[in-house]
Image (cartoon, rainbow, N blue to C red):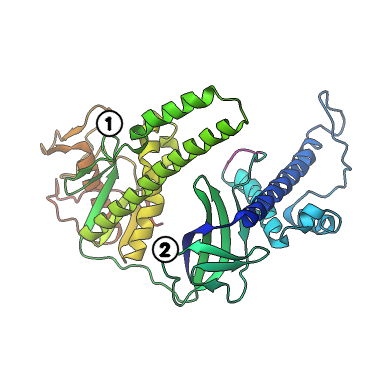
Amino acid sequence: MITLTYQFKLKVNRQQTQEIEHILSVCKSVYNYALAERKHWYNSRKSPVSSCSLISEYIIPANALYPSYNNQAKNLTIAKKTNQDLKSVNAQVLQQTLKTLDKAFSDMKSKGFGFPRFKKQMKSFVFPAMLKNCLAEGKVKLPQLGWLKIKQSRDYPTGFEAKQARIVKKATGYYLMIAFQSQESCPSAPVGKTSLGIDAGIESFVATDRGELIEAPKFLLKAQSKLKLLQRRLKHKIKGSNNWLKLQNKIAKLHEKVANTRRDWHFKLANYLCELTDNIFVEDINFTSWSRGIVRKQSLDSGIGQFINEILPFVCWKRSKFYLKVNKDGTSQECSNCGNHTGKKHLKERIHNCQYCGYTAPRDVVSAEVIKNRGLIAVGHTVNQNAYGDVLTGISQDLISLVKCL
Protein backbone atom coordinates (compact mmCIF):
# COMPACT_ATOMS: atom_id res chain seq x y z
CA MET A 1 0.00 0.00 0.00
CA ILE A 2 1.38 3.40 -1.03
CA THR A 3 0.29 6.72 0.48
CA LEU A 4 1.10 10.11 -1.05
CA THR A 5 0.25 13.51 0.44
CA TYR A 6 -0.27 16.50 -1.85
CA GLN A 7 -0.59 20.08 -0.62
CA PHE A 8 -2.58 22.75 -2.44
CA LYS A 9 -3.28 26.36 -1.51
CA LEU A 10 -6.95 27.17 -1.03
CA LYS A 11 -8.64 30.13 -2.73
CA VAL A 12 -11.50 30.85 -0.35
CA ASN A 13 -14.02 33.65 -0.23
CA ARG A 14 -15.16 35.54 2.85
CA GLN A 15 -17.99 33.14 3.71
CA GLN A 16 -15.75 30.08 3.42
CA THR A 17 -13.10 31.78 5.56
CA GLN A 18 -15.65 32.40 8.29
CA GLU A 19 -16.79 28.77 8.09
CA ILE A 20 -13.23 27.45 8.41
CA GLU A 21 -12.51 29.78 11.34
CA HIS A 22 -15.71 28.61 13.04
CA ILE A 23 -14.67 24.95 12.70
CA LEU A 24 -11.22 25.73 14.11
CA SER A 25 -12.80 27.56 17.06
CA VAL A 26 -15.16 24.67 17.88
CA CYS A 27 -12.34 22.13 17.55
CA LYS A 28 -10.26 24.17 19.99
CA SER A 29 -13.14 24.25 22.49
CA VAL A 30 -13.68 20.48 22.21
CA TYR A 31 -9.97 19.77 22.64
CA ASN A 32 -9.62 22.01 25.70
CA TYR A 33 -12.82 20.69 27.31
CA ALA A 34 -11.74 17.07 26.82
CA LEU A 35 -8.27 17.86 28.17
CA ALA A 36 -9.74 19.57 31.25
CA GLU A 37 -11.97 16.53 31.82
CA ARG A 38 -9.00 14.18 31.82
CA LYS A 39 -6.96 16.56 33.95
CA HIS A 40 -9.70 16.74 36.59
CA TRP A 41 -9.98 12.96 36.64
CA TYR A 42 -6.23 12.62 37.30
CA ASN A 43 -6.25 15.33 39.98
CA SER A 44 -9.18 13.71 41.78
CA ARG A 45 -7.09 10.57 42.30
CA LYS A 46 -3.85 12.17 43.47
CA SER A 47 -4.84 12.25 47.13
CA PRO A 48 -4.63 8.98 49.16
CA VAL A 49 -7.85 7.27 50.18
CA SER A 50 -7.10 7.75 53.90
CA SER A 51 -6.48 11.52 53.73
CA CYS A 52 -7.61 14.69 51.98
CA SER A 53 -5.57 17.11 49.92
CA LEU A 54 -4.46 20.33 51.63
CA ILE A 55 -4.57 22.28 48.35
CA SER A 56 -7.73 21.40 46.49
CA GLU A 57 -10.01 18.46 45.90
CA TYR A 58 -12.14 17.53 42.89
CA ILE A 59 -15.30 15.75 43.86
CA ILE A 60 -15.55 12.98 41.28
CA PRO A 61 -17.17 9.65 42.22
CA ALA A 62 -14.78 6.78 42.81
CA ASN A 63 -16.61 4.61 40.28
CA ALA A 64 -16.43 7.28 37.55
CA LEU A 65 -14.94 5.87 34.36
CA TYR A 66 -11.71 7.25 32.96
CA PRO A 67 -12.55 9.78 30.19
CA SER A 68 -10.99 7.73 27.39
CA TYR A 69 -11.60 8.41 23.71
CA ASN A 70 -14.58 6.05 23.55
CA ASN A 71 -16.28 7.60 26.57
CA GLN A 72 -15.63 11.15 25.39
CA ALA A 73 -16.89 10.32 21.88
CA LYS A 74 -20.15 9.00 23.38
CA ASN A 75 -20.56 12.16 25.46
CA LEU A 76 -19.85 14.25 22.37
CA THR A 77 -22.70 12.55 20.51
CA ILE A 78 -25.05 13.35 23.38
CA ALA A 79 -23.86 16.96 23.63
CA LYS A 80 -24.39 17.55 19.87
CA LYS A 81 -28.13 17.16 20.36
CA THR A 82 -28.39 20.27 22.54
CA ASN A 83 -25.30 22.37 21.67
CA GLN A 84 -25.74 24.37 18.46
CA ASP A 85 -22.00 25.01 17.98
CA LEU A 86 -21.21 21.30 18.14
CA LYS A 87 -24.15 20.52 15.86
CA SER A 88 -22.84 22.97 13.24
CA VAL A 89 -19.53 21.10 12.77
CA ASN A 90 -19.01 17.76 11.05
CA ALA A 91 -19.06 14.94 13.63
CA GLN A 92 -16.02 13.17 12.18
CA VAL A 93 -13.94 16.36 12.46
CA LEU A 94 -14.70 16.60 16.18
CA GLN A 95 -13.97 12.90 16.66
CA GLN A 96 -10.57 13.38 15.03
CA THR A 97 -9.91 16.20 17.51
CA LEU A 98 -10.56 13.77 20.38
CA LYS A 99 -8.25 11.22 18.71
CA THR A 100 -5.51 13.87 18.56
CA LEU A 101 -5.83 14.39 22.30
CA ASP A 102 -5.84 10.64 22.92
CA LYS A 103 -2.65 10.27 20.87
CA ALA A 104 -1.02 13.05 22.92
CA PHE A 105 -1.73 11.09 26.12
CA SER A 106 -0.46 7.81 24.64
CA ASP A 107 2.74 9.56 23.48
CA MET A 108 3.15 11.02 26.97
CA LYS A 109 3.13 7.51 28.45
CA SER A 110 5.07 5.62 25.77
CA LYS A 111 7.56 8.23 24.55
CA GLY A 112 8.03 10.25 27.72
CA PHE A 113 6.52 13.46 26.34
CA GLY A 114 5.20 16.19 28.63
CA PHE A 115 1.62 16.53 29.80
CA PRO A 116 -0.65 17.89 27.01
CA ARG A 117 -1.34 21.62 27.21
CA PHE A 118 -4.40 23.68 26.48
CA LYS A 119 -4.46 25.17 23.00
CA LYS A 120 -4.65 28.91 22.45
CA GLN A 121 -5.58 28.33 18.83
CA MET A 122 -6.17 25.35 16.57
CA LYS A 123 -4.32 25.48 13.27
CA SER A 124 -5.72 22.44 11.46
CA PHE A 125 -8.55 19.96 11.33
CA VAL A 126 -9.08 16.68 9.47
CA PHE A 127 -11.82 15.15 7.34
CA PRO A 128 -11.03 11.41 7.76
CA ALA A 129 -13.31 10.37 4.88
CA MET A 130 -13.71 11.95 1.47
CA LEU A 131 -16.84 12.22 -0.64
CA LYS A 132 -17.33 10.37 -3.92
CA ASN A 133 -16.22 12.25 -7.05
CA CYS A 134 -14.72 14.96 -4.85
CA LEU A 135 -11.84 15.91 -7.18
CA ALA A 136 -12.18 18.22 -10.14
CA GLU A 137 -9.91 20.52 -12.11
CA GLY A 138 -8.92 23.33 -9.76
CA LYS A 139 -11.38 22.47 -7.00
CA VAL A 140 -12.13 19.88 -4.29
CA LYS A 141 -15.41 18.97 -2.61
CA LEU A 142 -15.28 18.50 1.16
CA PRO A 143 -17.98 17.53 3.67
CA GLN A 144 -19.83 20.55 5.15
CA LEU A 145 -17.68 23.06 3.20
CA GLY A 146 -18.71 21.95 -0.29
CA TRP A 147 -16.60 22.84 -3.33
CA LEU A 148 -13.40 24.77 -2.55
CA LYS A 149 -11.18 26.31 -5.19
CA ILE A 150 -7.50 25.36 -5.03
CA LYS A 151 -4.34 26.54 -6.72
CA GLN A 152 -3.61 23.25 -8.44
CA SER A 153 0.15 23.26 -8.91
CA ARG A 154 0.28 19.61 -10.03
CA ASP A 155 -2.01 16.93 -11.42
CA TYR A 156 -3.71 14.44 -9.14
CA PRO A 157 -1.86 11.10 -9.06
CA THR A 158 -3.33 8.47 -11.36
CA GLY A 159 -4.24 5.11 -9.86
CA PHE A 160 -4.68 6.61 -6.40
CA GLU A 161 -7.81 7.28 -4.36
CA ALA A 162 -8.31 10.33 -2.14
CA LYS A 163 -8.73 9.06 1.42
CA GLN A 164 -8.29 12.00 3.79
CA ALA A 165 -8.11 15.78 3.74
CA ARG A 166 -6.64 18.23 6.22
CA ILE A 167 -7.07 22.02 6.16
CA VAL A 168 -4.09 23.86 7.64
CA LYS A 169 -4.03 27.53 8.60
CA LYS A 170 -0.71 29.28 7.92
CA ALA A 171 0.45 32.88 7.85
CA THR A 172 0.11 33.03 4.06
CA GLY A 173 -3.40 31.55 3.97
CA TYR A 174 -5.21 28.22 4.12
CA TYR A 175 -3.77 25.03 2.63
CA LEU A 176 -5.38 21.70 1.78
CA MET A 177 -3.42 18.49 2.32
CA ILE A 178 -4.94 15.45 0.58
CA ALA A 179 -3.74 11.91 1.33
CA PHE A 180 -3.93 9.64 -1.73
CA GLN A 181 -3.74 5.89 -1.32
CA SER A 182 -3.08 3.02 -3.70
CA GLN A 183 -3.45 -0.71 -3.05
CA GLU A 184 -0.36 -1.46 -5.11
CA SER A 185 2.65 -2.67 -3.13
CA CYS A 186 6.00 -0.92 -3.52
CA PRO A 187 9.03 -3.17 -2.95
CA SER A 188 11.99 -1.81 -1.05
CA ALA A 189 14.94 -0.57 -3.09
CA PRO A 190 17.62 -3.24 -3.55
CA VAL A 191 21.23 -2.73 -2.52
CA GLY A 192 23.15 -1.18 -5.40
CA LYS A 193 26.77 -1.19 -6.45
CA THR A 194 27.95 2.29 -5.45
CA SER A 195 27.65 3.61 -1.90
CA LEU A 196 27.87 6.94 -0.13
CA GLY A 197 28.45 7.62 3.56
CA ILE A 198 27.04 10.85 5.00
CA ASP A 199 28.08 12.41 8.29
CA ALA A 200 26.04 15.16 9.95
CA GLY A 201 28.60 17.82 10.81
CA ILE A 202 28.84 20.90 12.99
CA GLU A 203 30.93 23.27 10.85
CA SER A 204 29.47 21.81 7.64
CA PHE A 205 25.90 20.69 7.14
CA VAL A 206 26.88 17.21 5.92
CA ALA A 207 30.15 15.61 4.86
CA THR A 208 30.47 12.75 2.38
CA ASP A 209 33.13 10.05 2.17
CA ARG A 210 34.14 11.53 -1.21
CA GLY A 211 35.61 14.57 0.54
CA GLU A 212 32.70 16.98 0.06
CA LEU A 213 31.96 19.38 2.94
CA ILE A 214 28.54 20.87 2.17
CA GLU A 215 27.72 23.99 4.15
CA ALA A 216 24.13 24.99 4.84
CA PRO A 217 23.00 28.50 3.94
CA LYS A 218 22.24 30.34 7.18
CA PHE A 219 18.55 30.78 6.43
CA LEU A 220 17.46 32.33 9.72
CA LEU A 221 20.58 34.45 10.20
CA LYS A 222 20.04 36.10 6.82
CA ALA A 223 16.53 37.13 7.86
CA GLN A 224 17.51 38.01 11.42
CA SER A 225 18.08 41.73 10.82
CA LYS A 226 14.60 42.13 9.32
CA LEU A 227 13.13 39.95 12.06
CA LYS A 228 14.73 42.09 14.79
CA LEU A 229 13.30 45.24 13.22
CA LEU A 230 9.77 43.83 13.12
CA GLN A 231 9.98 42.53 16.69
CA ARG A 232 11.29 45.87 17.94
CA ARG A 233 8.33 47.62 16.31
CA LEU A 234 5.96 45.01 17.77
CA LYS A 235 7.13 45.80 21.29
CA HIS A 236 5.74 49.35 21.07
CA LYS A 237 2.29 48.31 19.80
CA ILE A 238 -0.75 47.76 22.02
CA LYS A 239 -1.25 44.03 22.43
CA GLY A 240 -4.35 42.88 20.55
CA SER A 241 -4.69 46.03 18.42
CA ASN A 242 -4.99 45.93 14.62
CA ASN A 243 -1.43 47.20 14.12
CA TRP A 244 -0.15 44.58 16.58
CA LEU A 245 -1.96 41.83 14.65
CA LYS A 246 -0.60 43.11 11.32
CA LEU A 247 2.98 42.97 12.62
CA GLN A 248 2.39 39.52 14.07
CA ASN A 249 1.26 38.36 10.64
CA LYS A 250 4.35 39.89 8.98
CA ILE A 251 6.63 38.09 11.44
CA ALA A 252 4.81 34.81 10.86
CA LYS A 253 5.12 35.21 7.08
CA LEU A 254 8.85 35.83 7.41
CA HIS A 255 9.29 32.67 9.49
CA GLU A 256 7.22 30.69 6.98
CA LYS A 257 9.38 31.97 4.11
CA VAL A 258 12.54 30.89 5.94
CA ALA A 259 11.06 27.43 6.56
CA ASN A 260 9.98 27.04 2.92
CA THR A 261 13.41 28.15 1.64
CA ARG A 262 15.15 25.68 3.94
CA ARG A 263 12.88 22.82 2.92
CA ASP A 264 13.36 23.56 -0.78
CA TRP A 265 17.16 23.50 -0.34
CA HIS A 266 16.90 20.19 1.53
CA PHE A 267 15.03 18.58 -1.36
CA LYS A 268 17.56 19.87 -3.91
CA LEU A 269 20.45 18.55 -1.82
CA ALA A 270 18.76 15.16 -1.34
CA ASN A 271 18.27 14.80 -5.10
CA TYR A 272 21.89 15.78 -5.70
CA LEU A 273 23.13 13.11 -3.28
CA CYS A 274 20.87 10.47 -4.85
CA GLU A 275 22.37 11.20 -8.26
CA LEU A 276 25.84 10.29 -6.95
CA THR A 277 25.18 6.77 -5.71
CA ASP A 278 22.89 3.75 -5.32
CA ASN A 279 23.20 3.28 -1.54
CA ILE A 280 23.16 5.99 1.13
CA PHE A 281 24.29 5.33 4.70
CA VAL A 282 23.71 7.82 7.54
CA GLU A 283 24.11 7.87 11.32
CA ASP A 284 21.28 7.00 13.66
CA ILE A 285 21.33 10.22 15.71
CA ASN A 286 18.85 11.67 18.19
CA PHE A 287 18.69 15.21 16.81
CA THR A 288 16.38 16.30 19.62
CA SER A 289 19.38 16.24 21.94
CA TRP A 290 21.32 18.33 19.40
CA SER A 291 18.64 21.02 19.61
CA ARG A 292 19.27 21.31 23.36
CA GLY A 293 23.07 21.21 23.36
CA ILE A 294 25.84 23.66 22.56
CA VAL A 295 25.11 23.41 18.81
CA ARG A 296 21.38 24.05 19.23
CA LYS A 297 21.30 27.25 17.17
CA GLN A 298 23.24 25.76 14.26
CA SER A 299 21.20 22.54 14.21
CA LEU A 300 17.85 24.33 14.41
CA ASP A 301 18.82 26.86 11.75
CA SER A 302 20.06 24.18 9.34
CA GLY A 303 17.19 21.73 10.00
CA ILE A 304 19.55 18.75 9.94
CA GLY A 305 17.04 16.49 11.72
CA GLN A 306 14.34 17.18 9.14
CA PHE A 307 16.80 16.43 6.33
CA ILE A 308 18.22 13.15 7.70
CA ASN A 309 15.01 11.66 9.13
CA GLU A 310 12.33 12.91 6.76
CA ILE A 311 13.40 14.37 3.42
CA LEU A 312 16.40 12.22 2.50
CA PRO A 313 14.57 8.88 3.15
CA PHE A 314 11.58 10.09 1.11
CA VAL A 315 13.72 11.14 -1.87
CA CYS A 316 15.67 7.85 -1.67
CA TRP A 317 12.40 5.90 -1.71
CA LYS A 318 11.05 7.96 -4.61
CA ARG A 319 14.22 7.47 -6.65
CA SER A 320 14.68 3.76 -5.71
CA LYS A 321 17.86 4.32 -3.72
CA PHE A 322 18.84 2.13 -0.77
CA TYR A 323 18.79 4.06 2.54
CA LEU A 324 20.15 2.73 5.81
CA LYS A 325 20.95 4.04 9.29
CA VAL A 326 24.02 2.70 11.07
CA ASN A 327 25.29 2.93 14.63
CA LYS A 328 26.62 6.39 15.44
CA ASP A 329 28.86 5.41 18.36
CA GLY A 330 32.55 6.12 17.87
CA THR A 331 32.47 7.25 14.24
CA SER A 332 34.83 10.14 15.07
CA GLN A 333 37.10 7.93 17.21
CA GLU A 334 37.79 5.28 14.58
CA CYS A 335 40.24 5.43 11.69
CA SER A 336 38.56 4.67 8.39
CA ASN A 337 41.84 3.47 6.87
CA CYS A 338 43.05 0.96 9.47
CA GLY A 339 40.07 0.51 11.79
CA ASN A 340 41.92 1.33 15.02
CA HIS A 341 40.49 3.39 17.85
CA THR A 342 42.28 6.75 17.81
CA GLY A 343 40.84 8.17 21.04
CA LYS A 344 38.26 10.78 21.85
CA LYS A 345 38.58 14.11 20.07
CA HIS A 346 37.56 17.56 21.28
CA LEU A 347 35.11 19.54 19.16
CA LYS A 348 37.84 22.01 18.20
CA GLU A 349 39.90 19.19 16.62
CA ARG A 350 38.70 19.20 13.03
CA ILE A 351 41.52 17.13 11.49
CA HIS A 352 41.85 13.36 11.89
CA ASN A 353 45.43 12.19 12.30
CA CYS A 354 45.82 8.45 12.94
CA GLN A 355 48.76 7.57 15.18
CA TYR A 356 48.82 3.99 13.82
CA CYS A 357 48.77 4.32 10.02
CA GLY A 358 49.38 8.07 9.63
CA TYR A 359 46.15 8.69 7.71
CA THR A 360 45.22 12.40 7.75
CA ALA A 361 41.95 13.92 6.54
CA PRO A 362 39.15 16.24 7.71
CA ARG A 363 37.42 14.77 10.72
CA ASP A 364 33.90 14.81 9.23
CA VAL A 365 35.10 13.14 6.02
CA VAL A 366 36.72 10.32 8.00
CA SER A 367 33.50 9.86 9.97
CA ALA A 368 31.60 9.60 6.68
CA GLU A 369 34.06 6.95 5.51
CA VAL A 370 33.53 4.97 8.73
CA ILE A 371 29.75 5.24 8.26
CA LYS A 372 30.08 3.94 4.71
CA ASN A 373 32.26 1.02 5.87
CA ARG A 374 29.76 0.10 8.56
CA GLY A 375 26.93 0.25 6.06
CA LEU A 376 28.78 -1.97 3.58
CA ILE A 377 29.48 -4.55 6.28
CA ALA A 378 25.85 -4.46 7.38
CA VAL A 379 24.55 -5.22 3.85
CA GLY A 380 27.19 -7.89 3.28
CA HIS A 381 29.52 -6.03 0.92
CA THR A 382 33.30 -6.01 1.10
CA VAL A 383 35.08 -2.86 2.27
CA ASN A 384 37.62 -2.08 -0.45
CA GLN A 385 40.19 -0.51 1.86
CA ASN A 386 43.64 -1.51 3.08
CA ALA A 387 42.98 -3.19 6.41
CA TYR A 388 45.39 -2.81 9.30
CA GLY A 389 46.51 -6.22 10.57
CA ASP A 390 44.34 -8.04 7.99
CA VAL A 391 41.17 -6.81 9.72
CA LEU A 392 38.52 -4.88 7.80
CA THR A 393 37.33 -1.56 9.16
CA GLY A 394 34.63 -2.15 11.75
CA ILE A 395 34.58 -5.94 11.28
CA SER A 396 35.26 -6.50 14.96
CA GLN A 397 31.99 -4.79 15.88
CA ASP A 398 28.73 -6.65 16.26
CA LEU A 399 26.81 -6.42 12.97
CA ILE A 400 23.48 -6.10 14.76
CA SER A 401 24.71 -2.99 16.57
CA LEU A 402 25.92 -1.46 13.31
CA VAL A 403 22.60 -1.16 11.56
CA LYS A 404 19.17 0.27 12.12
CA CYS A 405 16.72 0.26 9.21
CA LEU A 406 14.26 3.10 8.78
- The count of marks equals 2
Q: Nearer the viewer, residue 329 or 256?
A: 256
What is the three-letter code of the residue carrying label 2?
Ser
Could you say whether the residue bearing mark 2 is in a helix, strand or loop? loop
Task: Give coordinates of residue 131: x percent, y percent.
Answer: 62, 72
Quadrant of the frame with the C terminus? bottom left
Position of residue 103 measured from the top left corner of the image (x, y, whole percent):
63, 51
Q: Which residues are magenta?
A: 112-117
Q: Is residue 164 above or below residue 229?
A: below
The residue drawn where x is 30% and y is 39% is: 330
Q: Amino acid at mark 1?
A: Lys
- Of residues 131 and 43, the one nearer the viewer is 131
Disc 1 target residue: 344
Magenta includes 115?
yes
Element marked by disc 1: loop
Q: Would residue 395 be seen by someone viewing this image from the given angle?
A: no
- Predominant secondary structure, magenta span: loop
Instruction: Provide the residue designation for mark 2.
Output: 153
Left or right: residue 271 versus residue 147 is: left
